[in-house]
Image (spheres, rainbow, N blue to C red):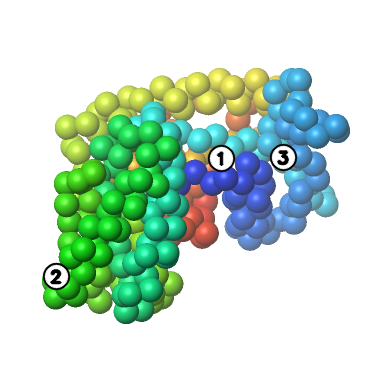
Amino acid sequence: MVSFPCLWDDKCEWRKGLKDFAIQFNEAFGKDYSLSKFLDISEKGGKQQTKQPEVLLEAPGDKPMVIECKKIVYPPKYYEKHRHFHYFFKDFYDSYNRDLKPILPQDVYEIGINENVLYQNKKQKFPSISNQIVAHVLQHIEEFHVSNQISSAEPIPWGFRRVPENERDDESYKSGLRLSSSAKSLSYQFDKLPEAEEEIAKELAKHLSNTDIKFRDYANCLKILVIEICGDILSIPSPEVIVEIIENATIPSSVDQIWLADPQDETESIISYYQIV
Protein backbone atom coordinates (compact mmCIF):
# COMPACT_ATOMS: atom_id res chain seq x y z
CA MET A 1 0.00 0.00 0.00
CA VAL A 2 2.94 2.32 0.89
CA SER A 3 0.60 5.13 1.98
CA PHE A 4 -0.96 5.57 5.41
CA PRO A 5 -4.46 6.93 4.59
CA CYS A 6 -5.41 7.84 8.17
CA LEU A 7 -3.69 9.89 10.84
CA TRP A 8 -3.56 8.09 14.16
CA ASP A 9 -4.66 9.99 17.27
CA ASP A 10 -2.00 8.19 19.30
CA LYS A 11 1.02 10.51 19.25
CA CYS A 12 3.43 7.90 20.64
CA GLU A 13 5.64 6.79 17.76
CA TRP A 14 6.69 3.69 19.71
CA ARG A 15 3.13 2.38 20.04
CA LYS A 16 2.18 3.43 16.51
CA GLY A 17 4.87 1.46 14.74
CA LEU A 18 8.42 1.65 16.04
CA LYS A 19 7.76 -1.21 18.45
CA ASP A 20 6.85 -3.38 15.44
CA PHE A 21 9.89 -2.05 13.61
CA ALA A 22 12.15 -3.17 16.46
CA ILE A 23 10.60 -6.63 16.41
CA GLN A 24 11.11 -6.96 12.64
CA PHE A 25 14.66 -5.59 12.87
CA ASN A 26 15.54 -8.13 15.56
CA GLU A 27 14.08 -10.97 13.51
CA ALA A 28 15.92 -9.89 10.36
CA PHE A 29 19.36 -9.54 11.96
CA GLY A 30 19.14 -11.92 14.90
CA LYS A 31 19.38 -9.09 17.44
CA ASP A 32 17.71 -8.45 20.78
CA TYR A 33 17.09 -4.68 20.83
CA SER A 34 14.54 -3.39 23.31
CA LEU A 35 13.30 0.07 24.28
CA SER A 36 15.64 1.86 26.67
CA LYS A 37 14.36 5.46 26.62
CA PHE A 38 12.00 7.90 24.95
CA LEU A 39 14.49 10.55 23.90
CA ASP A 40 12.10 13.28 22.73
CA ILE A 41 10.33 13.45 26.11
CA SER A 42 11.96 15.29 29.00
CA GLU A 43 12.10 13.97 32.56
CA LYS A 44 9.18 16.21 33.55
CA GLY A 45 7.00 14.93 30.73
CA GLY A 46 7.40 17.91 28.41
CA LYS A 47 9.19 18.23 25.10
CA GLN A 48 12.97 18.39 25.09
CA GLN A 49 14.53 21.80 24.51
CA THR A 50 17.02 20.31 22.03
CA LYS A 51 15.88 18.20 19.11
CA GLN A 52 16.17 14.49 19.83
CA PRO A 53 15.40 11.22 17.99
CA GLU A 54 12.24 9.37 19.00
CA VAL A 55 13.71 6.45 20.94
CA LEU A 56 16.88 4.79 22.18
CA LEU A 57 17.12 1.01 21.99
CA GLU A 58 19.79 -1.20 23.52
CA ALA A 59 20.84 -4.82 23.02
CA PRO A 60 23.42 -7.02 24.78
CA GLY A 61 26.70 -7.03 22.85
CA ASP A 62 25.59 -4.43 20.27
CA LYS A 63 25.98 -0.68 20.14
CA PRO A 64 22.86 1.33 21.05
CA MET A 65 20.33 2.26 18.36
CA VAL A 66 18.46 5.55 17.95
CA ILE A 67 15.44 5.83 15.68
CA GLU A 68 13.79 8.85 14.15
CA CYS A 69 10.42 8.52 12.40
CA LYS A 70 9.33 11.07 9.78
CA LYS A 71 6.05 11.43 7.92
CA ILE A 72 5.78 12.73 4.37
CA VAL A 73 2.21 13.82 3.67
CA TYR A 74 0.84 14.29 0.15
CA PRO A 75 -1.22 16.16 -0.88
CA PRO A 76 -0.03 18.73 1.71
CA LYS A 77 -3.52 19.36 3.18
CA TYR A 78 -4.59 15.73 2.96
CA TYR A 79 -4.95 15.11 6.70
CA GLU A 80 -6.73 18.41 7.27
CA LYS A 81 -9.40 17.34 4.79
CA HIS A 82 -9.39 13.73 5.94
CA ARG A 83 -10.12 14.75 9.53
CA HIS A 84 -13.12 16.63 8.19
CA PHE A 85 -14.18 13.40 6.52
CA HIS A 86 -14.06 11.48 9.82
CA TYR A 87 -15.81 14.22 11.77
CA PHE A 88 -18.69 13.93 9.33
CA PHE A 89 -18.84 10.14 9.68
CA LYS A 90 -19.13 10.42 13.46
CA ASP A 91 -22.15 12.74 13.15
CA PHE A 92 -23.73 10.65 10.39
CA TYR A 93 -23.18 7.47 12.40
CA ASP A 94 -25.13 9.01 15.29
CA SER A 95 -28.03 9.94 13.01
CA TYR A 96 -27.93 6.55 11.29
CA ASN A 97 -27.99 4.63 14.60
CA ARG A 98 -30.82 6.73 16.00
CA ASP A 99 -33.23 6.87 13.04
CA LEU A 100 -32.21 4.54 10.22
CA LYS A 101 -30.55 1.45 11.66
CA PRO A 102 -33.63 0.32 13.66
CA ILE A 103 -35.72 -0.08 10.48
CA LEU A 104 -33.09 -1.66 8.23
CA PRO A 105 -32.23 -5.37 8.07
CA GLN A 106 -28.90 -6.22 9.69
CA ASP A 107 -26.43 -5.87 6.84
CA VAL A 108 -23.47 -3.84 5.56
CA TYR A 109 -24.33 -0.31 4.41
CA GLU A 110 -22.17 2.48 3.03
CA ILE A 111 -22.51 6.24 2.96
CA GLY A 112 -20.51 7.87 0.17
CA ILE A 113 -19.94 11.59 0.03
CA ASN A 114 -17.96 14.02 -2.09
CA GLU A 115 -14.98 14.80 0.14
CA ASN A 116 -14.07 18.01 -1.70
CA VAL A 117 -17.57 19.44 -1.34
CA LEU A 118 -17.73 18.32 2.29
CA TYR A 119 -14.54 20.24 3.02
CA GLN A 120 -16.26 23.45 1.94
CA ASN A 121 -18.69 23.06 4.87
CA LYS A 122 -17.85 23.87 8.46
CA LYS A 123 -17.74 21.07 10.98
CA GLN A 124 -20.66 22.63 12.88
CA LYS A 125 -22.96 21.89 9.92
CA PHE A 126 -22.29 18.14 9.91
CA PRO A 127 -25.11 17.14 12.32
CA SER A 128 -27.63 19.02 10.15
CA ILE A 129 -26.24 17.55 6.92
CA SER A 130 -26.35 14.06 8.43
CA ASN A 131 -29.94 14.48 9.62
CA GLN A 132 -31.03 15.68 6.18
CA ILE A 133 -29.46 12.66 4.46
CA VAL A 134 -31.05 10.21 6.89
CA ALA A 135 -34.42 11.96 6.54
CA HIS A 136 -34.19 11.63 2.73
CA VAL A 137 -33.48 7.91 2.97
CA LEU A 138 -36.41 7.45 5.35
CA GLN A 139 -38.74 9.33 3.01
CA HIS A 140 -37.74 7.00 0.16
CA ILE A 141 -37.27 3.82 2.16
CA GLU A 142 -39.47 1.67 -0.11
CA GLU A 143 -37.43 2.72 -3.12
CA PHE A 144 -34.27 1.87 -1.22
CA HIS A 145 -35.52 -1.61 -0.32
CA VAL A 146 -36.02 -2.32 -4.02
CA SER A 147 -32.82 -0.86 -5.47
CA ASN A 148 -30.50 -1.13 -2.41
CA GLN A 149 -29.17 2.34 -3.15
CA ILE A 150 -30.25 5.94 -3.11
CA SER A 151 -28.52 9.25 -3.74
CA SER A 152 -29.04 13.00 -3.94
CA ALA A 153 -27.13 16.21 -4.57
CA GLU A 154 -28.60 17.86 -1.47
CA PRO A 155 -27.46 19.06 1.00
CA ILE A 156 -24.15 17.81 -0.48
CA PRO A 157 -23.61 15.09 -3.11
CA TRP A 158 -24.07 11.74 -1.35
CA GLY A 159 -25.06 8.13 -1.92
CA PHE A 160 -26.29 5.47 0.49
CA ARG A 161 -26.29 1.80 -0.44
CA ARG A 162 -26.26 -1.79 0.71
CA VAL A 163 -22.74 -3.09 0.03
CA PRO A 164 -22.86 -5.93 -2.57
CA GLU A 165 -21.65 -9.36 -1.47
CA ASN A 166 -18.73 -9.33 -3.93
CA GLU A 167 -17.28 -6.22 -2.27
CA ARG A 168 -17.12 -7.72 1.19
CA ASP A 169 -13.53 -8.87 1.25
CA ASP A 170 -13.08 -8.31 4.97
CA GLU A 171 -14.63 -10.48 7.67
CA SER A 172 -15.12 -7.39 9.82
CA TYR A 173 -17.76 -6.14 7.38
CA LYS A 174 -20.42 -8.73 8.14
CA SER A 175 -22.65 -5.93 9.38
CA GLY A 176 -22.39 -2.23 10.13
CA LEU A 177 -21.79 1.05 8.33
CA ARG A 178 -18.87 2.13 6.14
CA LEU A 179 -17.78 5.52 4.83
CA SER A 180 -16.37 6.17 1.37
CA SER A 181 -15.43 9.18 -0.70
CA SER A 182 -16.96 9.60 -4.14
CA ALA A 183 -14.40 12.29 -4.90
CA LYS A 184 -11.57 9.82 -5.39
CA SER A 185 -10.63 8.76 -8.88
CA LEU A 186 -10.51 5.08 -9.77
CA SER A 187 -7.06 5.47 -11.27
CA TYR A 188 -3.85 7.34 -10.64
CA GLN A 189 -3.75 10.94 -11.80
CA PHE A 190 -0.76 10.39 -14.05
CA ASP A 191 -0.54 14.06 -15.06
CA LYS A 192 -0.12 14.99 -11.37
CA LEU A 193 2.54 12.42 -10.50
CA PRO A 194 5.57 14.60 -11.46
CA GLU A 195 4.26 17.27 -9.10
CA ALA A 196 3.77 14.67 -6.36
CA GLU A 197 7.29 13.30 -6.85
CA GLU A 198 8.78 16.80 -6.62
CA GLU A 199 6.87 17.64 -3.43
CA ILE A 200 7.76 14.33 -1.79
CA ALA A 201 11.44 14.84 -2.68
CA LYS A 202 11.34 18.33 -1.12
CA GLU A 203 9.73 17.05 2.07
CA LEU A 204 12.26 14.24 2.27
CA ALA A 205 15.12 16.72 1.98
CA LYS A 206 13.70 18.77 4.89
CA HIS A 207 13.30 15.66 7.04
CA LEU A 208 16.83 14.50 6.29
CA SER A 209 18.21 17.87 7.35
CA ASN A 210 16.23 17.82 10.61
CA THR A 211 17.21 14.22 11.28
CA ASP A 212 20.87 15.09 10.78
CA ILE A 213 20.59 17.63 13.61
CA LYS A 214 18.93 15.11 15.91
CA PHE A 215 21.55 12.43 15.25
CA ARG A 216 24.65 14.58 15.84
CA ASP A 217 24.90 13.70 19.54
CA TYR A 218 24.68 9.97 18.88
CA ALA A 219 27.87 9.20 16.98
CA ASN A 220 28.38 5.93 18.87
CA CYS A 221 24.87 4.65 18.05
CA LEU A 222 23.33 2.92 15.06
CA LYS A 223 21.18 5.72 13.64
CA ILE A 224 18.05 4.73 11.75
CA LEU A 225 15.49 6.90 9.97
CA VAL A 226 12.04 5.36 9.39
CA ILE A 227 9.92 7.06 6.73
CA GLU A 228 6.14 6.90 6.51
CA ILE A 229 4.44 8.07 3.31
CA CYS A 230 1.03 9.39 4.28
CA GLY A 231 -1.97 10.57 2.28
CA ASP A 232 -4.23 9.69 -0.63
CA ILE A 233 -2.89 6.48 -2.18
CA LEU A 234 -4.29 7.49 -5.58
CA SER A 235 -2.21 10.68 -5.57
CA ILE A 236 1.06 9.12 -4.46
CA PRO A 237 3.69 7.63 -6.80
CA SER A 238 4.26 3.88 -6.94
CA PRO A 239 6.44 2.15 -4.31
CA GLU A 240 9.23 1.80 -6.86
CA VAL A 241 9.27 5.57 -7.46
CA ILE A 242 9.20 6.28 -3.72
CA VAL A 243 12.23 4.03 -3.27
CA GLU A 244 13.99 5.80 -6.16
CA ILE A 245 13.32 9.20 -4.59
CA ILE A 246 14.87 8.04 -1.31
CA GLU A 247 17.88 6.46 -3.00
CA ASN A 248 18.56 9.64 -5.03
CA ALA A 249 18.31 11.98 -2.04
CA THR A 250 21.33 13.64 -0.46
CA ILE A 251 21.62 11.56 2.69
CA PRO A 252 23.65 13.02 5.61
CA SER A 253 26.54 10.89 6.85
CA SER A 254 24.87 10.84 10.26
CA VAL A 255 22.10 8.60 8.92
CA ASP A 256 23.22 4.97 8.89
CA GLN A 257 20.07 3.35 7.55
CA ILE A 258 16.72 4.41 6.04
CA TRP A 259 13.68 2.13 6.25
CA LEU A 260 10.30 2.58 4.57
CA ALA A 261 7.09 1.70 6.39
CA ASP A 262 4.48 -0.18 4.35
CA PRO A 263 0.97 -0.70 5.82
CA GLN A 264 -0.43 -4.06 4.76
CA ASP A 265 -4.12 -3.40 5.43
CA GLU A 266 -6.59 -0.52 5.45
CA THR A 267 -6.69 -0.35 9.24
CA GLU A 268 -2.89 0.07 9.32
CA SER A 269 -2.72 -2.59 12.04
CA ILE A 270 -0.10 -4.58 10.13
CA ILE A 271 3.01 -2.68 9.03
CA SER A 272 6.03 -4.10 7.24
CA TYR A 273 9.37 -2.29 7.09
CA TYR A 274 11.89 -2.42 4.25
CA GLN A 275 15.47 -1.18 4.34
CA ILE A 276 16.12 1.23 1.46
CA VAL A 277 19.57 2.55 2.40
* Residue 55 disc label: 3
Left or right for 121, reference 184: right
Left or right for 40, reference 108: right
Instruction: Name the residue that disc number 1 marks.
Output: 226
Instruction: Name the residue that disc number 2 marks.
Output: 143
The structure residue drawn at horizontal position 71% and vertical position 55%, both measured from the top left corner, is 31
Count the numbered circles shown: 3
Q: Position of residue 15 (x, y in %)?
A: 65, 51
Q: Are marks 3 and 2 in contact (CB under 8 Å)?
A: no
Query: How many C-alpha atoms fall within 10 Å of the one at disc 3: few (<14), some, or many (≥20)?
Result: many
Of residue 17 and residue 25, the one placed in the foreground of this image is 17
Q: Position of residue 266 (x, y in %)?
A: 41, 58
Disc 3 secondary structure class: strand
Amino acid at the residue labelled 1 = Val
Amino acid at the residue labelled 2 = Glu
Q: Earlier in the sequence, mark 3 or mark 1?
A: 3
